[in-house]
Structures are given as structure tokens and as C-alpha cells.
Amino acid sequence: MNGSAYRTRGASAIIHNSQFTIHNSLFDSSCSGFILLLGVSKQFAELAHHNILFSPDYPAEFEAIFEQGQPPDDPTIYIAITSKTDPQHAPEGGENWFVLVNAPPLDDRYDWHANQQAYRDRILQKIADFGFDVREHIVAEQVLTPHDLAEGSGAWRGALYGASPNSPWAAFKRPHNRSKQIEGLYFAGGTTHPGGGVPMVTLSGKVAAELVLEDLQKR
């Protein structure tokens, strides 16, 4: 099948969802992220489940990330508060904040260990500048840097979406969902087709499952 020289043993099919590290190392990385997980003892009526606080200079933000390897001084900030939709996600009178800003993939141009606290403070100050000063209401907090994303998920350079999608041909360079070398091996996850992010990763699992069923019917 498919000209495969090898096949899986002990299983009719295997769906593999780890990172394509070697493949990703051959291409530029997508951005990473800097994340604040906040338990907040106040409710902000002006905010919704999904919120975006835009940078006034979008081009400069991405120049800092991809050209300079630095986290932007004035980034776009995404805030998700799931307790807006399901109040059981936070104690009464409080909220759960997921705060995400784009960050450069890991390299030696920025020291996250040395600068994590300062950048955390910068992000909270910018949120306050938009009128949502949460600092005095934080009762629980976890900070995740690109190092944490790399170590916790195995993501190459802490990249959120695998290889960089900034090319007309990027989608065609992603590993396929069916192995060409090993019969019965299939791939799912953020570094294969169709791409990164929860909806696309879920879809990749659906595609892989459909390929498994299709191939099993041919045997």
C-alpha cells in the first residue's frame, strides 16, 4: 500500500500525535506564546468570553517577534474568560483569565528566565491601560513562557503552530496524515495537516481516523 517498505507490527493502525521535530527544524518556526493564567477575585462586566486588546503598531509587533527575536514591547493581547459562559469555572464573584500574547520562538536572543517577571508586569500594565486593572485582584497565578511550552508539550522551540505558516507553500510542506514510509502509521496534531490550533488539531484527528477506516476497508 502506498509503496510502503515497512508496516506497523502488533496493531492494525497507529495514530501518532507527537511533534515532527526533525521536520520542523528544517523550516522557520511559527511564533510561540507568553501566557498568564489568572484567578481573579473581581468580575469585569465590560469584558466578554473572548477579548482582544490590539497593538497600535501591528507590523512592529511581528517585526520584533520574527526579525529581532524579541517579545514586542506593545503586543496584541488575547484574554479568554470562560467563566463568562460557564460561571462554575470560577468562584462566585470571580473570574478565570487566560491571557496570551505572541512571543518569538526560542533562541539565544532573549532570556526568558531573566525577564519573565518584567514582561509579566508589562502585560498587566498594558491591560490596565485599557481600563482593566486586574493586578490588585489576582488571587492565583501561573506564568508560562516559551520554555514552559517547549518542555511541557515537546513543541520545537516552543512554537505554537509548528513550522512557520508565512508562505503560500507552507500548507503543502506540512507532513501528511498518512505515512508514506510505514504502512499503518498515521499522524495527527498541530504540526501535520491541516495546521495548529485546537480546531485544526481536532480536524487532523478526524482526517487521520478517516484514513485509517479507508485503508482498513481495502485490506
Image (tube, rainbow, N blue to C red):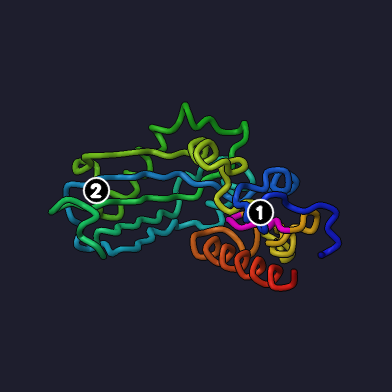
- Residue 85 spot, x, y in % from top left: 26, 65
Q: Nearer the viewer, residue 101 or 145?
A: 145
Report the amino acid beneath label 1.
Ala
As helix, strand or loop, the secondary structure at mark 1 comes to loop
Q: Residue 188 colored magenta?
A: yes
Q: Is residue 91 left or right of residue 76?
A: left
Q: Quadrant of the C terminus?
A: bottom right
- Residue 148 spot, x, y in % from top left: 48, 37
Magenta-highlighted residues: 184-190
Task: Name above or below for residue 207 compared with residue 188.
Answer: below
Q: Identify the residue shown where x is 49% and y is 32%.
A: 112
Task: Indicate which disc residue 133 carries.
Answer: 2
Callout in the foreground (1, 2): 1
Q: Quadrant of the N terminus?
A: bottom right
Task: Indicate which disc residue 129 carries.
Answer: none
Task: Name above or below for residue 219 compared with residue 109.
Answer: below
Which residue bears the numbered disc 1?
11
**In the displayed image of the protein, which residue is found farthest to the top?**
114
As helix, strand or loop, the secondary structure at mark 2 comes to loop
Q: Residue 185 colored magenta?
A: yes
Q: Identify the residue shown where x is 56% and y is 33%.
A: 110
* Mark nearer the N terminus (1 vs 2): 1
Distance in Å between CA atoms under marks 1 and 2: 54 Å
- Residue 81 spot, x, y in % from top left: 30, 57
